[in-house]
Amino acid sequence: MLNVDEPGAEEINEPVPLEFARALLVQARAYGRDIDALLETARFPFNPLLPPERPVFVSIEQYSRLCMALFQELGDESGGAISGIHTPIGTTRLLLYSVLRCGNLQAAMERAIEFNACCRERQGEVRLNDLVIDRRSKLATLRYYSTPDLKNPPPQEGTLCGLSMWVRLCGWLIGQYIDIVSATCAGPPPRPTHAIRHFFHCPVAFDCDCDSVTFSARHLELELLRSEQDLESFLRVAPYHVVIKPITSDASITTRIRALLGSDLRGALPSFEALTSLLNMSARTLRRRLEKEGTSYQRIKDNARRDAAISLLSRDRMTVSDVAEQVGFSDPSAFHRSFKKWTGQSPGAYG
């Protein structure tokens, strides 16, 4: 069994961006909760909503405790983010316990869908959750349907982000990052778009008939690698890993390749042949490993450039041309086309 402390050990001292803690308190305030009492319950050392006197550090443990305190205060493990759904405290823990002994991820996801149908508390809406596998394209789509009040349609971005969090939990179960390649939202584009941008670095279509996330079906074939002991350790910091930074396993070939590529993407990246030498494996073995993880070397390179570009575009004084150069494009128009293909939006939309 994999131990949750192993893949996450190098991440445990990373600071959590302050805006994530602020977002929790904004949600609490929207529900009329006492902010000071919530901070005291979470043993949080300061109020993130007040201007800091000096640079502050929010640890993974502090952020996770604040999440848990909000869930307890609202009596809802979705933090009130999913319209029409109430998730009682302890639901996620029991759901994960119910799937740990499944033979592979597909069986686990199907059992989770059955669990949701039986155990989630709904508020007058008919809902349907299903998993569709397209054998020809080798893609799987997790769908979530709802029947909203057409006179007062609820926001759907919380539901869509919830699907992304569930996919991250599934990635933890198999010890691999699951890359969402496209998504649909059963509602209009939200304003602001920060939450959608955070969870989805892929094209997202709006005003669709359901919320859905699509990913490689090869992940569904993989066995679950986690034990009950792993689960108890993971749950202590689960909010950080499902909301901010998913856990990746050092055993994943995708993780190893991303580490080899590094953060400097300005020059030519290693060829596939050079990569086989760096990894000390044959081309056939590498292709088989990549296919098993539902990806390819080209996709890993594209995702590395995409993620770096999104990060750079949020910085002040960085033009699109500057960002293009930083991620290895000599022609800004070629970068524009590639970025639009990767994310469904132009680079300017992230500026």
Image (spheres, rainbow, N blue to C red):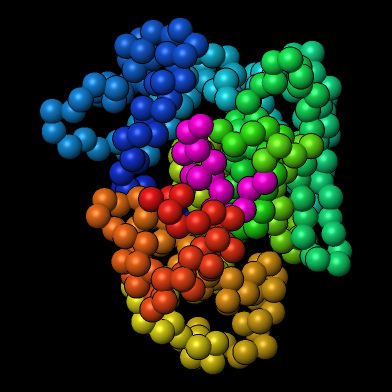
Q: What's the residue at 50%, 56% (across, down)?
A: 346
Asked if the magenta segment contains residue 193, the reply would be yes
Left or right of 205 on screen, residue 250: left
Residue 86 makes an appearance in the image: yes
Residue 330 placement: quadrant: bottom left
Residue 156 place in picture, x, y as percent = 65, 30
Q: Is residue 67 above or below residue 88?
A: below
Q: Residue furthest left?
A: 53
Q: What's the residue at 48%, 24% (across, down)?
A: 68
Residue 302 place in picture, x, y as percent = 53, 70
Q: Quadrant of the N terminus?
A: bottom right
Q: What's the residue at 58%, 71% (across, down)?
A: 299
Residue 108 makes an appearance in the image: no
Q: What's the residue at 59%, 47% (across, down)?
A: 168
- Relative depth, front residue between 78 and 182: 182
Q: Residue furthest front?
A: 333
Bounds of the magenta span? 191-205
Q: Is residue 180 above or below residue 120?
A: below
Residue 90 place in picture, x, y as percent = 62, 24
- Relative depth, front residue between 44 and 135: 135
Left or right of 312 on screen, residue 24: right
Residue 337 place in picture, x, y as percent = 53, 67
Left or right of 254 on screen, residue 185: right
Residue 152 placement: quadrant: top right
How many discs mark residues in the rendered view?
A: 0
Asked if the magenta segment contains residue 313, the reply would be no
